[in-house]
Amino acid sequence: MLFAERTGHLREEGAYVVFGKAQQLERQGRDIIHLEIGQPDFATFSNVAAAGICAIKNGKTRYTLPAGLLELRQTVAETVGSSRGTAAEPEEVIIAPGSKLLLFFPTLALVGPGDEVLYPNPGFPTYEAMIRLAGGKPVPVPLCEEKGFSLDIEAAGQLVSDRTRLIILNSPGNPTGGVMPVSDLEHIAALARKHDCWVLSDEIYSRLVYDGSTFTSIASLPGMKSRTILVDGFSKTYAMTGWRLGYGVMPKELAGRVSLLLTHSVGCTASFTQYAGIEALCGPQDQVERVRQEYQKRRDAVVSGLQEIPGISCQTPGGAFYAFPNVTALGKPVEELADYLLEEAGVAVLPGTAFGSLGEGYLRISYANSLSNIQQALEQIRQALGRLS
Ligand SMILES: Cc1ncc(COP(=O)(O)O)c(C=O)c1O
């Protein structure tokens, strides 16, 4: 079949590929432990689910304005104001069915042919896909393992130029769990100001930071709010992946352009989902904290378990729910290794290369699974790798 050239670069997301292989094995009767998928294993918090159900029962099932319900936009503006320390107005907030669209549409609105976009590699695969769909040139920036997988600031300084239109940040990051220190954010902010470019800050894991550290958004640094698109959502924090709800905060003029893109694509976000979002932000937050503490326990179990396996070394990630162990000493391409672990250990993990070429030598392990499954998986991995040598 003949397709438009602009879609020729699109590839499947690695997580779905491995998930598909794992399901095939399960259909053959194998038990597989899933550490490949990046979604909370917890149910949507009950007060939030109840608010969505109540909205449906009360007939809140009609179109909303493309940019979202004013009440939710106001709530997001207040939430971002207090969590990031940067005041926002409802007109600067856009609601969409998932934060992915709030990565994609601002990129489509800002980036054109010839424009360069810096983005993390390894990084969330949607970044490269959307840069190419917009006609821009993807410029990968490596991460520094020894600096907790923060963006390599020196490399960013060399790669940025007056052709750079946008710099994408993701802290805490997928696939590494890395958190950028404030000093690195300050460096990137200085580059963005100097080269007059935008920053797209994907903050979907902002509520999942560990060891008592606090989250800082680049939007809160001097002179940055007017050139930052801050993206967050409900999928990870409130276990709402299937509800499809995300938000972006950006200057009003850009918000207007993104709203037009929503008008002519999805129309609007499901109305009852937006009511659930209001409850998520305004309701009690103790479950968010309880879940965060549970992830921290799992992270500690994953990291210490991996460290004990010969040939594996693992940084302690500062956020999200991923570990990114270095497996170069095992001397196998990671795609082969991930296949081997699926077949021989019955554990689904992702090869680092599912997140870009610079992911070679690493595996991504999602610890959005129970502590007992994680411990069982680590034991099975240890035994299978023992047989390998
Ligand atoms: C870094 C990152 N950004 C964005 C998303 C998309 O989230 P949403 O479900 O809100 O579209 C994900 C989901 O895995 C992610 O890992």
Image (cartoon, rainbow, N blue to C red):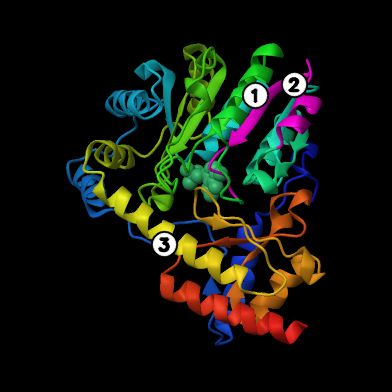
Name the front one of labels 1 and 2.
Answer: 1
The type of residue carrying mark 1 is His
Instruction: For mark 2, give the secondary structure.
Output: strand
Residue topped by disc 2: 164
In front of the other: 376 or 125: 376
Which mark is first along the chain, 2 or 1?
2
Number of marks in picture: 3
Q: Is residue 153 magenta?
A: yes
How far across and down, in percent of the image, does residue 309 sit?
64, 74
Q: Earlier in the sequence, mark 1 or mark 3?
A: 1
Q: Quadrant of the C terminus?
A: bottom right
- Given residues 57 and 37, the one toward you in this image is 37
Q: Residue at x 48, y 67 (%)?
A: 301
The magenta-colored residue range is 152-174
Q: CA distance from mark 2 to mark 3?
A: 40 Å
| Residue ID for mark 1 | 187
Kindly identify which numbered label has been placed on residue 2. Answer: none
Q: At 66% across and 58% down in the image, what residue appears? A: 14
The kind of residue on which mark 3 rests is Lys
Which residue type carries mark 2?
A: Thr
Q: Secondary structure at mark 3?
A: helix
The alpha-carbon separation of the residues under discs 1 and 3 comes to: 32 Å
Q: Which residue is rendered at x = 59% and y = 67% of the image? A: 19
> Which residue is identified by label 3?
297
| Residue 292 x/y as whole percent | 37, 52
